[in-house]
Amino acid sequence: MEYSAAAAYLEGLTDYEISPAAAYNAANFDLRRVEILLREMGQPHRGRKTVHIAGTKGKGSTAAMISSILVSAGYRTGLFTSPHLYTWQERIAVNGRPVTKRDFARLAGAVQKRIEAISREARFGKITTFEALTAMAFLYFRDKGTAFQVLETGMGGRLDATNVVDPDVCILTSISFDHTQVLGNTLAKIAAEKAGIIKPGCTVISAPQQPEALAVIAAQCRLSGCKLVLAGEDIKWKRLSGDLKGQTLSVRGRNDSYKLHIPLLGDHQLENACLAVAAAEALSQQGAGVTVDNIVRGLDSVKWPARLQVLRQSPLLIIDGAHNTYSMKAMLESIRNYFPYKKLHIIFGSSADKDIDGMAAVLAGFAGSVIVTSSGHPRAAAAEQLAHIFRQRGVPADIRPDARQALSAALAACGDDDLVLATGSLFLAAEIGRAFKEGNFR
């Protein structure tokens, strides 16, 4: 099987990232079919230490930081994240290097016959795209002899395909309202889905949470007999300085104190770094050989694109994948704190199932101008719909048919001291990033 055929095969399976499930339940997301698939492949998800991450915001960044720390400590480490920005290969990596096209095709071929048999039998439903990718990741991590695997849940946690593991460390990043039509319309309901990854015997690390969410997490820890480490209380951080290349912070952990640099921008990344340090300390307490120097060097070398990523400096051009009201507020607060500018030009695109009105309300008070466009993703909202929502809030919105034309228009309208921000979805951020890389803009 060639890579293009492997990608086409995966895209032909049920993909809830493109078409959200009509019902989020144990029938549509039945872990038994994933367990059968993995059993037939020899249980590739077992045999290595596991860090499992759920939450609303910062999962991928935190996962990348932990992976980088473990690689710095000399451990071969698998990393599974979603969604991808440009290619399927990005989702499965070992030691920071994405799986090659050749290996990706081999892995897809290895699971295809088993998937078809399970789906044909249909006792527990058909294998989905995300479930197939999860199985491929576990198989790849086993093939590569990884000692650790760091797993980001796709959506929720309780019924997520990654929730077949017995984790050593569970992390709950900041929980807020997202996927409310699927996960629930209260923080308690959403937190219950996220906290479903907690298993007996693991160490649980949580970001600072709203009381409603924290109560659910704490209750699940008590039920499972797990120790809860709370960032902001048991481990604390403080920002020291920063520039367009990154920021420094101090962290007072349970094992030691650290002065760290991360090449990622935004106050939320300081919180994510704190969670990564807490995870490294927990793994160290469990016997992993992770030193202070490993943590320092690992965080200094982490890479995670499309999160307050600066593509150029004059005028400033930034892409960020914020896609809900909470993350939009946090991102804009960081924009105000980190970047001096005269006028803010926003390029906005969003998936149709997101809280577009809420994001528009947040952006309306900051925008000097708004250009809306629709990404090529099947879930993308129509640009006309986006423009209407902004105009209802008194913000004129210009429509451009694609990311390249939106970027061209935004750059043409701004001065050297202005800032162009592309946001609203990771898919839009990726398309703007690709357009900038491929095109010649003034």
Image: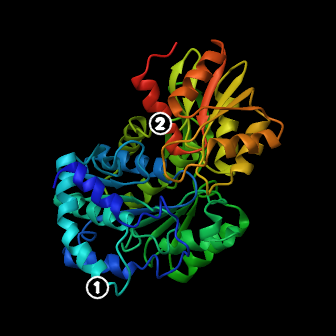
Q: The residue tagged with tag 2: helix, strand or loop?
A: helix
Is residue 290 toward the left or the right of residue 237 in the image? left
Q: How many marks?
A: 2
Q: Which residue is under mark 2?
A: 431
Mark 1 highlights which residue? 121
Residue visible at 57% across and 41% down?
A: 374
Residue 211 in which image quadrant:
bottom right
Q: Is residue 245 visible?
A: yes
**Image quarter for residue 286?**
bottom left
Specify the amino acid type for callout 1. Answer: Glu
Residue type pointed to by label 2: Glu
CA gap between label 1 and label 2 equals 39 Å
- Camera-side residue: 90 or 298? 90
**Which label was assigned to residue 171?**
none
Q: Position of residue 244 (x, y in %)?
A: 54, 24
- Residue 277 horizontal side relative to residue 286, left or right: right
- The spot of residue 205 in percent (x, y) is 52, 62
Front residue (pair 54, 5):
5
5 displayed left or right of 400: left
